Amino acid sequence: MQDRKSRLVTSAVLVNGLLISSLANAATVEFWTAQTQTDRLQNIELLASTFEALNDGVTVKVVAVDENEMATQMAAAVAAGTTPQLIEVNSEIIMALGEEGIVDTKTHQGVIKDIGKNRFHKGALTTLTSPTGEYYGLPYHGWIQGIWYRKDWFDEKGLAAPNTWENIETAAKALTDKANNQYGILVGTKQDSYTEQVFTQLALSNNAAEFDAKGNLVFNSPATLETIKYYKELAKYNPPGPQNWRARDYYLQGKMGMFFYSTYIMDDLALAEVAKGSLSSENFKELSGGTFDPELVKNTAFAPIITHKSAASYGTLSGLVALKSQKAEDTKATKDFIEFMYDPASYITFLHMAPGGMNPMLKGIAEDPAYLEDPNGVFKLYGADKMKQIVSGFDDIRSFSVVNGKTFPASGAIFAKSVIPRMIYDVTIEGKDPQAALDKATDEMKAIMGQ
């Protein structure tokens, strides 16, 4: 089976016109990947073997490194002078490595030139761009968050897509009928990461921030306060009680009009076997349970970008990072291997390891017929047009932790302490005054930063 798969990838690469090179001198690409699961490693090793078969004299050594250990392992490798040629890791670590000056930005620039800058989703590329315009990494895969909504219900009521603050609030109100256990929206109100993710996207769309470009804490601002007040209004149309992602059950049982969620929800909406965990009354006594709706995927649309004062989407991305090397042969082989990994045949093989969780950063891939044939049979149920719209969110992906190419690790520490979710809980569940809750959160952030 493995041999057959290898031949298929090889043939597809050849069909796509990838150049087969024959390096005069031996070269090595040590590739550290954050994909540690056995099946994923086997796929990556298959791709590496295919590349080796196409490039005489090149050895690709795949090394799995737990993402939580990546920064520590890299620090040790830098100290020992044994850094790999290439790593695949999340954007926060990529930016930190870039600031250390060990990243081969020339190779990244060369890859972008060869592939075409406009092929990359703009926001994803910007996320990995330094303050001086260099690329600390190359976006490779990620997930995106937005609002999934009942398009058929919106059409029946003449509602506009929930892509602006006004449209979201109008729809949430119109689709709520509490007397019949029907709710307009789900926003997080528990003290957990789901709440922080929903709030962050809305805050970014209002130009609120945690830090300015100089690293000053600017969270306590009129923009943040306005976002908190808006969030409190949306929470009025939530199912009763503190809620988190679990309340997606209301949507899958036809009792909710829209909800914030990442692309990880795609198979739950499309496949009966996956959806059954949300179709019982086990999680909410207010729900009676239901049967899978095969029309739900067709009747669901996605708004990945929310606009108020600016456009914003939220998600995470991982990228490929070439490290500086002493050997020109290794540098060239690394660049060739990166471009091989972006070739549609290789790229789709990689992305299909986690459909919905690993989405493409190159335009055109999501609509590729081969990409739509994912192993779980999910993407073809959405269709090419909807898949294109889903990944378009990467054009405006932003975060609190990176401002104009500078990273602020304190943002991660603040996230770990759940400062923002507790602030939202205080306002939406405990009824605390928004400004007082914001002041308290700011004090906690300062304490975390040692100010």
Image: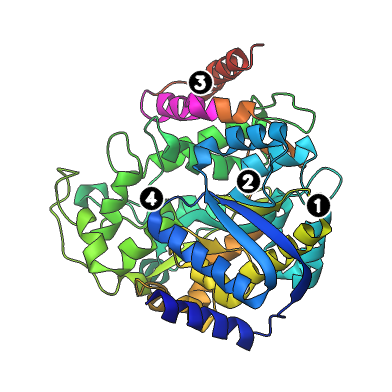
The mark lying in front, picked from 2 and 4, is 2
Q: Which image quadrant for residue 138?
A: bottom right
Q: Amino acid at mark 3?
A: Ala
Q: Amino acid at mark 2?
A: Ser
Question: In the rendered image, which residue does mark 2 sit on?
Answer: 91
Q: SS for tag 2?
A: helix
* Mark seen at residue 437: 3
Q: Please name the residue shown 40% across and 33% down the image.
A: 192
Q: Which image quadrant for residue 366?
A: bottom right
Question: In the rendered image, which residue does mark 1 sit on?
Answer: 105
Label 2 vs label 1: CA separation? 15 Å
Q: Give coordinates of residue 46: x percent, y percent.
A: 50, 68
Q: Give coordinates of residue 349: x percent, y percent.
A: 50, 71
- The mark that comes first in sequence, 2 or 4, is 2
Label 1 vs label 4: CA separation? 43 Å
Q: Amino acid at mark 1?
A: Thr
